[in-house]
Image (spheres, coloured by chain):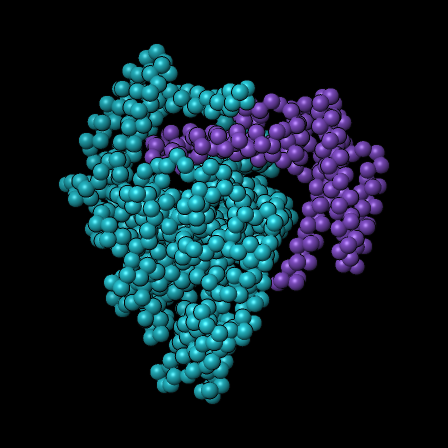
Amino acid sequence: MAESGLLQIRDPSKPYGKPVGIDLGTTNSLVAYVDQEGRAHTLPVDAEGQKLLPSVVHYTEDGSTMVGRQGREKLATHPHETISSVKRFMGKGPDDPETRKLGHLRFRAAPGDAIVRFDVGSKIVSPVEVSSEILKTLRRKAEAILDTQVGAAVITVPAYFDDAQRQATKDAGRLAGLEVLRLLNEPTAAAVAYGLDRRARGTFAVYDLGGGTFDVSILELVEGVFEVKSTTGDSALGGDDFDRALAQVLLDQLSDALGRDLSLDPFAIQAAMAAARAAKHELTERESAVAVIALPERTVEVEISRPQFESLIASLVQRTAVACRRALQDAEIDASQIDGVVLVGGSTRLPLVRRFVSEIFGGKQPLGDIDPDQVVAMGAAIQAENLGGVPRDDLLLLDVIPLSLGVETMGGVVEKIIHRNSTIPTSAAQIFTTYADGQTGMDIHVLQGERELVQDCRSLARFQLQGIPPMAANMGRVQVTFAVDADGILEVSAKELTTGVEQSVVVQPSHGLTDEEVEDMLIASLDHAEEDVAVRFVVEARVEAERVMNDLHKAQAADPALLEEGERETIDEAERALRAAMESTDHDRINLAITDLDQASSGFARRRMERAIREALSGHAVEEFE
Amino acid sequence: MADHFEILGLPRSFRVDAKRLEERHRELTRLLHPDRHAAAGAAARRLALEKMIEVNDAWRVLKDPSRRAAWLLREGGIDLGETGAQGASRYLPPGFLLEVMEHREAFDEARAAKDQAAVDKLAASIRQERAQTLEDLGAAFDRDDYEEAARRLSVLRYQDRFLGEVRAYEDAMFEETHG
């Protein structure tokens, strides 16, 4: 295979180009980057300099896409072929109540399908694919403006997103050709944008009312460490619901005016939603607004006063108080101990919401001087630069898992194994015992949520443990380790304790795509697919090889004394083998050689790590004596 | 079994200096967090992650008096599990169950009558008793009296569970008015 352009433009020290932060929102999405002075900026996504890309994807008859404002313009005329608010469907099954809400989409799931799918006329698409179109658009805009390759991103998610929703977001990133450096919780991203600016210290609440999700997080800031104490929310409540509440009223009036029921008419629904959105924005500044509902046959105007609108949404806003109270309780503080409140999301511009937030958090005037629509993307850009560009010592984010993880036990009861608000990364091990003679497999059902019964929690996945050596009943003991990584995503591994044999774990996500499905989509999305994917695998393997060797050289130069007798020779030999492998275009061979080098240097790496830990701990001991 | 105190570089004792515990955790996190190793090779990332998880696990156990006591007890030869009231019941001090039943009755009555003042009063008295239990636990561990510590931990778990139920009730009341 010939070296393609892709292989040549990569700078090994920055294998994925300029890292960016992406706020993949329900209503709008944004992309931001950090400039050479370390300041975050959101990037314009169209010729008029707009920063907000409407999260709307229109599928044309030939299957190509129109994303953003162009796509949104098609909502009124092509409601079935145009997908908005796709974020609400990420990681959801076809039976989810979300699919039955006031909407205009055609759902089309095959029997037994684990995820929602939309029929957009020219094809059937999943929410992951729709989201990846939004991400691709943002990526291309950023590449055009920054005039460089963009291949890595921090993508934000609502803090309250469960495992399936996070995995779906990560899959969308992969499908858009992005290395997802981290999934970052939106409230945490907002806190970063504020906190770093002000060198703040203290306890902060972030009230994040997005288009379709609500999060509230309590964070403690000490010397650049952002420690999330608690997070909670409602992943099905947002500004969209305000629009829907108003649109419902408009639809009723429209039906009256035209003398027929329009509540299920997709064109009327779209027109009412558009009118409601416009009226909501106007009511932020003014005491009353006129909603203009434009239908092909007739245009109807409805006057709405602010008190009228506020009474429509009051109960929705009230609902956020439950989450705020729980966040405070989980953080074991009361409202008076909050030093500041950060507002995130366009809906927090509404005067009613501002009054309400101030009331809940002990009368504090909320901070809103960074645009609440842009603050999340800016925080994400700062973290992206930290992880994929220039690392900064003064920034560290400690986040938590928003919902407890558990396994199904006898009688349909969930036994919690990792509790909500545990700092991630974290893990827990559980021992399962065989119940039949000669049993070689075991099924484990993993759930997420706070309730006691299986039916009340979110089913995440079923795991099959296979290859347990046949033994008498109760003799086979399998230790299953549930690990949650820094993205809040679960990984499972298993070991049979009697024999010490690692068990294979076959994952069947309840509401997600398998790795193979994502891989297939990736291949299908590229021209000259197989060749391109092969090239990408080789590039990734070489990047990893460079990383490993760079690390090792730095380590050897810093700590030659920690190398044991003969160790350097073994390492050098493995490194020579890796260099030889890198000459080839066989990514499997390169990866194997990386593993060998890792193996050869693992003892040295461990000694360095352990010494660093001892130093960190003894550093404190010295201070205490002073 | 990893020694949580050793991992965080703290003396093994039920009486933990909360401020120092937080500092140690923060210090080690600066060193080990995956974000600090984002540019490293896979093996180096795995190694740091493994240690980070160990540190987070130790921190989670040590900052919670109930889990901390359970860990120390197991080291002393009495395994009551990390949480839960199951294994704990055989260590309950005499007369305690009667007390629990009385509290429960009072709570059920207050709950049925939606008498918030009565619930508050009950919760306040349990909180006060809980503070005493923590003192007693500390004293028992100081004497290496594990049997007594097991009894006090069993009491603590009942008190925590009771306060959890009070909280669930208050949450439900709040949700009723804000649903």
Name the residue rendered at 48%, 58% in the picture. A209
Image position of A501 with respect to A247: above or below: above
Q: Is residue A140 above or below residue A294?
A: above
In the image, residue A139 sits, relative to residue A483, either above or below, namely below
Residue depicted at x 34% and y 32%:
B40
Q: Position of residue A98 (x, y in %)?
A: 49, 63
- The answer to whether any part of residue A325 appears in the image is yes
Q: Is residue B81 visible?
A: no
The residue nearer to you, when weighing A249 against A446, is A249
Task: Report which quarter residue B142 is drawn in.
Answer: top right
Q: Which chain is purple?
A: B
Furthest residue toward left: A2
Q: Position of residue A476 (x, y in %)?
A: 56, 32
**Front residue (pair B80, A147):** A147
The quadrant where residue A84 appears: bottom left
Locate residue A185 relative to residue B125 in the image: left or right. left
The cyan-tinted chain is: A
Q: Position of residue A276 (x, y in %)?
A: 44, 73
Q: In which quadrant of the rendered image does the C terminus of chain B lie? A: bottom right
Residue ID at (46%, 53%): A158
> What is the tally of numbered marks visible in this picture?
0
Quadrant where the N terminus of chain B sits is top right
**Which percent across, then down, holds residue A354?**
52, 61
Q: Quadrant of residue A542?
A: top left
Residue toward you, A568 or A49: A49
User: In the drawing, does residue A583 fall left or right of residue A622?
Assistant: left
Point 61% across, 29% down: residue: B17
Q: Nearer the viewer, residue A348 or A329?
A: A348
